[in-house]
Amino acid sequence: MSTFGWLTVAIAVPAAGALIIALTPGASAPGSDADRRARELLVKWLALVFTLLTLGVTLAMAAVYAPGGPRFQFNQAYSWIAQFGIHYAVGVDGIALVLIVMTAVLAPLVVMGLWNTVGGEAASPAVQAGGGGAGRAPRRHSVKTYFALLLVLEAMMIGSFAATDVFLFYVLFEAMLIPMYFMIGSYGVGQRQYAAVKFLLYNLLGGLLMLAAVIALYVYSARGGHPGTFLFSQLTHLPLSPAVQKWLFLGFFIAFAIKSPLWPFHTWLPDAAASAQPGDAVLMIGVMDKIGTFGMIRYCLLLFPVAAHYFTPLILVLSVVGVLYGAIVAIGQTDMKRLISYLSVSGMGLITLGIFAMTSQGQAGATLQMVNHGFLVGALFLLAGFLIARRGSQLIEDYGGVQKVAPMLAGLFLLASLAGLALPGLNTFVSEFLVLVGTFTRYKAAAVAATVGIILAAIYMLWMYQRMMTGPVRKEVEGFGDLRARELWAVGPLVALIIALGVYPQPVLNIINPAVHQTLTAVHVKDPAPPHPATAGGPSSQKGTAP
Amino acid sequence: MTPISGSLAAAPITAPHIEYWQLSPMLVVFGAAVAGVLVEAFVPRSQRRGWHLVLALGGLAAGFALTIAVAVSVPLFSHGSPGRVAAEGAVGVDGPTLFIQGTILVLALVSLLLIAESSHEVSPFVAQAAAVPGSAEEREGLLAGITHTEVYPLALFAVAGMLLFPAANDLLTMFVALEVLSLPLYLLCGLARRRRLLSQEAAMKYFLLGAFSSAFFLFGVAMLYGFSGSVRLSAIAAAAASNTTGAALLYAGIALLGLGLLFKIGAVPFQSWKPDVYQGAPTPVTALMASCTVVSAFGALLRVFYVAFGALTWDWRPVMWAVAILTMVVGAIIAITQTDVKRLLAYSSIAHAGFILTGVVAASTTGLSGSLFYLAVYGFTTIGAFAVVTLVRDPAGEANHLSRWAGLGRRSPLVAGVFAFFLLAFAGIPLTSGFTGKFAVFQAAIAGGALPLVIVGVLSSAIAAFFYVRIIVLMFFSDPAPDGPAVVTPGLFTGLAVAVGVVTTLVFGIVPGPLLDLASHAAGHLFVR
């Protein structure tokens, strides 16, 4: 147990990076074109250095973390606004820790993946994303602003996983929308304004409903003469009547359901993802959406256990619908970024299913799936971004025969696609299997229906691969170069992680499992089946008996 | 200021006892205003502006310093008392009043910086208010380069009235204060140099509707006098608590008085003057009205409903609920369709009045302190936003139509960024003072059992966020109009006003502790009776 403020450092490093980048001279500073390029290069290197530093800090933190230790580690708490009992309080359990590491892994890769695409070159008129802003003369964008926003976003994301004060979490959860909004709205493609506004309003609505619940939570904590508080550790002991719990649960849950996004709150995601730069999409779907599902485990379950049980059937139904709906709609997509985002809708449905199945395999699987899904989406979007940078189109039909001209690119794309359909040996297989097994022991029908969704994944992933990579080489594709060293550095680690976590997920599960057990103990749930995947699915008499 | 006391008997008249020290903040501002009139009469035209600046800024600063001195020196809260009454019971000197007066003085000081800005090629104020628009007389005045310096004493009178309005402890003093603050504002609204007809129309509308509301207010006072036999707030409260007869008079009085007060804050359904007046008035005057007048009127509303009708909370609360809900929802929804930035800010101000009303209906110390905090931080952000509006200009003056703001973020990223920051604060995004303020009032409202009201508030915030974001989109993501307005470099005064707005919005968003402390300390004992 270390008392060093690891989390504060992990938040401060990217924030400091953003500040330093903001202070470098911008594009409008005097100087020739070459000077400007040199300045842009400096900004990119700064961004890379700071994201790598953050990764180093989080990895060191993960190494120091004691999986068998107390529930929350690396705790720090300082009073912030004393009048409202608001603290700067951070601390992580195993679930938050793995998600923080995932965030820190993705950030430098996104920086590398976007190395040449941010700025004027990306907004070339050739990019077709369903009309809108395309076709105008390309504008130069400030590279500096983009990477500063990206680092701010990283700091806020890590902060929201680390927060143990509900108010601090809410603030970061909401404030995160602003950098992402500008990243989509200013640097995106196609109907980027529409997508950015839709993204912001959807998430703001959810966030404001959560605000009402957050304030109400504070007011209830102040009942009976106590000073009110927002500290998570104290709020979990708050006696709330079931009726109150239900209302507050809904306030939090709708916000998280929009963020994750759970069907039917998902409609902002495909638009936002299709209009965002591939790197933004990685952070948006890979990390930001996970904050939604993370919030369900941390806040919905632990603060309102009674309400969580009450709403479980409804949420399970929505999750299963999401899994199937996302998969079916993905089949019909013509735009690869939209296809990947519907894959995510389907995948996030599976995660909520795992969480609310309320079994240890289910939740461990759901947490592992959050991490795996982050890496998977990262790899898919970065590869899609490399393809778009070469061809200038997001449409699947504009490609064909890529594997003949760029075998490495196509090969990695195939591997990521196979991870998308949960091929055994790749990371998502482990987590999806755990989720389904964990669900099956309690809700058979839901597990069976969700499995169908995973089978459908094979259709859209392989079909996309077939249409884009195989067949005769199209004329426009002929000039494709294979992956450059920078691109390989960006996507290689993700593919390596996809394989590594598929073969040997145990280290991550060792960190996750204690936190999952503590969560389930706190919500008074016992597993219906013995807690070993190998024997799970055996007892068939306990269907649908949530306590 | 003359107290209404004593009998009609031919007893020897004793001079009223006046606590000059406790009243000194108001007296100084009144004195500066009167001196300003004398300056107008005796000082040559070329030197007037300098004199006025010294008088006005000095008077307001001295008033603020005295407010602090009074708050520190007078043992207001000794032995658990909420404060003192001064001037034979006509004026209350208590925590909330001093907080509101201090807020008004600082906000007025910042607004006055906008009024005094002289770096624009033309002043925002008309040369001669009496000249008919388009007449030869007007042209002469313009050519002679006359500037309207009566603005300063008028503004000072208005501010002095605003200081007295929330402090008034009887309804007649309150009415006098209402008139003192309103009359100069009616005049100031009609003084815009550009688009004079619009400005005069605004002044006329404001005057007519304001006169109606004053009449309702006075009628309400008469009813309450008929009910309780006194115009003192405490006497009305005592009568309301004990009398069982004549309740019709009481309720009619509450309704009419409330109408007069709600008109001033621009609550729905008494909001229709706000967009027209805010649009037509010279922008610096709009900034003064949107910040100081709202603070003052809320102060009076809080005092009347907490002191005089404090025992009748259950009677007026349902009506206030309805008004608050209507104000939030109507303000937010109608704002969506606005195309003029000043009208849009007017509707946003209506919606914000609704948010503050949720703190008022809580009828508790936390509700009071939340409202006080909200008023203070909202005032600063508002002035900052209007200051930015004065900077975006084309050859015809300020470019207020929203379509002209397209692409502003590309040409002037700093100004557009500052405005976007203010809009985000209005929208209540965390880490801005707007969020802390909303949090403070919503928290009090939920504690007071008004959860549905808060949910409506939250939903209206989401609607409001839509139109704030729309402007940000327009500024940053749209292509600039080829002949779009230029952003002038702010002069010293305007720059200062914008800077104050940015700094307070940011600081009270991140470290609101000290101001919250001050507000809750001020509200700790409610109002003096």
Image (cartoon, coloured by chain):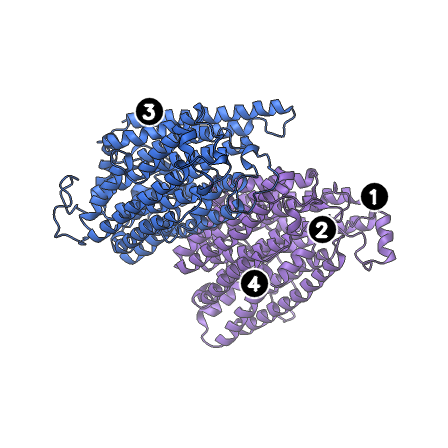
Chain colours: A blue, B purple
Residue at mark 3 to residue at mark 2: CA–CA distance: 67 Å
Residue at mark 2 to residue at mark 1: CA–CA distance: 19 Å
Indicate the amino acid at tag 4: Leu
Q: Nearer the viewer, residue A324 or A140?
A: A324
Q: Is residue A531 left or right of residue A317?
A: left
Q: Nearer the viewer, mark 2 or mark 1?
A: 1
In the picture shown, does residue B416 fall above or below A222? above
Res B489 label? none
Q: Chain of mark 4?
A: B
The 10 Å Cα crowd at callout 4, few under 14, some 14 to 19, many 20 or more, is many
In the picture shown, does residue A158 fall above or below B172? above
Q: Secondary structure at mark 1?
A: helix
- The residue that label 4 is drawn on is B262
Q: Is residue A76 left or right of residue B86?
A: left
Q: Nearer the viewer, mark 3 or mark 2?
A: 3
Residue at mark 3 to residue at mark 4: CA–CA distance: 60 Å
Counting from the top left corner in percent of width and height, residue A380 is at 39, 36
Q: Nearer the viewer, mark 1 or mark 3?
A: 3
Q: Is residue B8 left or right of residue A199?
A: right
Q: Nearer the viewer, mark 4 or mark 2?
A: 4
Indicate the amino acid at tag 2: Ala
Indicate the amino acid at tag 1: Ser
- The residue that label 3 is drawn on is A60
Q: Secondary structure at mark 3?
A: helix
The 10 Å Cα crowd at callout 2, few under 14, some 14 to 19, many 20 or more, is many
- The residue that label 2 is drawn on is B33
Is residue B511 in view from this perspective? no
Q: Secondary structure at mark 2?
A: helix
